[in-house]
Image (cartoon, coloured by chain):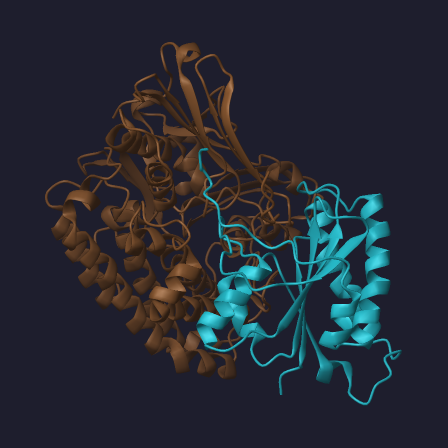
Amino acid sequence: MSLSLETAANPENLRRVAIDPVSRVEGHGKVTILLDDKNRVHQVRLHIVEFRGFEKFIQGRPYWEVPVMVQRLCGICPVSHHLAASKALDAIVGAKHLTPTAEKNRRLMHYGQILQSHALHFFHLCSPDLLFGFDSEISKRNIVGIAEKYPETARRGILLRKFGQEVIRHTAGKRIHGTGAVPGGVNKSLSIAERDELLKDIYQMVAWSREAVHMVKELHHRNPELYNSFGAFRANYMSMVGFDGGLDLYHGHLRARDENGDILFDGVDYRDYTQLIEEEVKNWSYMKFPYLKSLGREKGWYRVGPMSRIQNCDFISTPLAEIERRAFIAYSGVMPMHAPLGYHWTRMIEMLHAAEMIKDLLHDDDITGSDLIVTGERGFEGVGVIEAPRGTLIHHYRVDENDLVTMCNLIVSTTHNNQAMNEAVRRVAQQYLHGHKITEGLLNHIEVAVRAFDPCLSCATHALGKMPLEVEVLDKAGERLSFLSRTGDGVLG
Amino acid sequence: MVAPVLIFAIGNESRGDDALGPMLLRKLDAWLNSGAWESELSPVEQFELIEDFQLQVEHVMDMQDRRLVLFIDAGMDTTAPYVFYRAQMSNEALLYSHALLPEALLKVYEQFYRQPSPDAFVLCIRGERFELGESPSPPAETHLAAALDFSGQLLLEAETTVWDRLCTQKSPGTAIRSAHEIR
């Protein structure tokens, strides 16, 4: 694992290319590349404008408001924040073990979120690159192009996404600002009518999810040279796994492996995360760089998300996803898969697992039960961790005697992946840009690497005109050679 | 029976003026249910009000069988107090994020259902600040009041021809350009 290409030796003599913002990711990310006269790459950085106002937003609020409030942090994965906060606040109300009905309804909500998020990412954000090619005609390389050329693929993506949203609506109580999970449990369980409505479609969702795994698996088998090497870098990886070692996206303990797949630590209580993880600040990025304390800054960074989870667990409890996990592991060989495009394959395995879990939960009588809440001895500090669609999500709160939040610390998935995403774009720059004349298609290769992680840089702010786009090429003296700008509603300047 | 007119507000109430869409939706909802509405059909029979953080592909399913769709949003560089225009389906709709523009959604609709999308309009209210935890700015509150008056007029005459006549500008359209085009 290296940190080369992070900082050029003589940046003042180099030409700068900026990709700003990186498209088809949420929030505002920017890549800058420094090139010399012969287009040799000397520095590549992914800059993320991370919003660090989360914690202040929460401080001073009554703790029981938090599971609803945190959904406003992110319009992309509000349910993940809702559930992580609820888990953390279970400790405040002394709920050590939820009722079966409460835990299963929370899980159902979570699998709905995983399903809809993974479906959107694969079918509508990444399939244009994978099905058309990284440097294909840009006017087709989007959702509209997919809908024209592969209408059934686009249709399934929409219906999978819609189904996941319906699971969320029924478990959370409404489309957005749901109140389903509360400290100590849930405030509603699935009704018989809601269960039956979801049961009508779930078998189709399982079938389509399985076919989606096969689609991406075939892409890997058809072009292993590309898929096994594109942006590949070796790294540690971390995730929560179930207490039995199986894939568990809702609850368990922390496990990490090194680049060879050997265990670094296992069975760690996630409430002790501060003993494991430290966050480094770099002067060129707003986003922190977490690393495992035991390995130090240089060697301790790690990946999270689907590719980490699928390779970190010992098995998957649902049969169809387990078959696909084994196929992925077999394809990877004796060493773990480190190529970022492997994220797509593993993401689809997780989508299949989520669909299977939803099916099983809908057939479980506890899901319509009425025992919703438990309480116990009042606590003043809680940590909640879930495996969100993009990776490990940590919520940590302290609450005072007046029930007000006095401390909040969040580590979101994209922060965990900060160094890993930087490494991926550096590898791609070395592989594809180094020494070549820069073209749009080549620069899209950089974006493909970033998108593989499905970063949510987040914020639900999307107001028209809010997000500008600026591209500039400077000469080595810092003079602008060319420039393009576009407002969020498409006005070019 | 699906209400023929869909009013879809987009925004996050915790991000300053991004709340304008949902705030307007709530005011319209209160007005429609205040008893002041005078029509042969009840508000529920005529309008469905939905809000979400942002537009996404599955929202085409909310548009099915509608006669008219009104998207309400907040805008940074919008002419104050608001602009109102017909959303033109775009063959070149740009998707650069997890969120879609109304124009792109119309295109997805046609691809999904293989039929023309309903007539759709955008009411975009000018906002000033969009940071997390901020309350709406005083100018935005003023713009919201003007937009409320205007949207009441829209609901009273929810017809394409009338809305076309009330447009304050043409669709700004979308552009499909690379996020990293060099010229």
Q: Is residue A128 above or below residue A443?
A: below
Quadrant location, the C terminus of chain A:
top right
**Residue A374 visible in the current orientation:** no
**Outermost residue, bottom side:** B40
Residue found at the very far right of the displayed protein: B36
Look at 51% across and 17% down and name the residue there.
A479
Frontmost residue, A107 versus B12: B12
Which of the 4 image quarters holds residue A289? top left
Q: Which residue is drawn at 34% across and 45% down?
A: A452
- Location of residue A185 in the rendering, given as x and y in whole percent from the top left corner: 53, 62
The spot of residue A111 in percent (x, y) is 41, 62
The tint chain B carries is: cyan
Vertical placement of residue A36 versus B127, above or below = above
Which chain comes out brown in the rendered image? A
Up-down relation of residue B97 to residue A163 (above or below): above
**A265 or A390, nearer to the observer:** A390
Side of A11 relative to A68 (left or right): left
Q: Position of residue A399 (x, y in %)?
A: 63, 42
Q: Nearer the viewer, residue A343 or A479?
A: A479
Q: In this view, does A401 lie to the left or right of A184?
A: right
In the rendered structure, the answer to whether residue B59 lies left or right of residue A333 reads right
**Residue A216 visible in the snapshot:** yes
Farthest residue to the front: give it. Answer: B183
- Which quadrant does the N terminus of chain A fall into? top left
The count of marks equals 0
The image position of residue B138, as x and y in percent, is: 84, 44
The answer to which quarter of the image holds residue B39 is bottom right
Towards the viewer: A389 or B165: B165
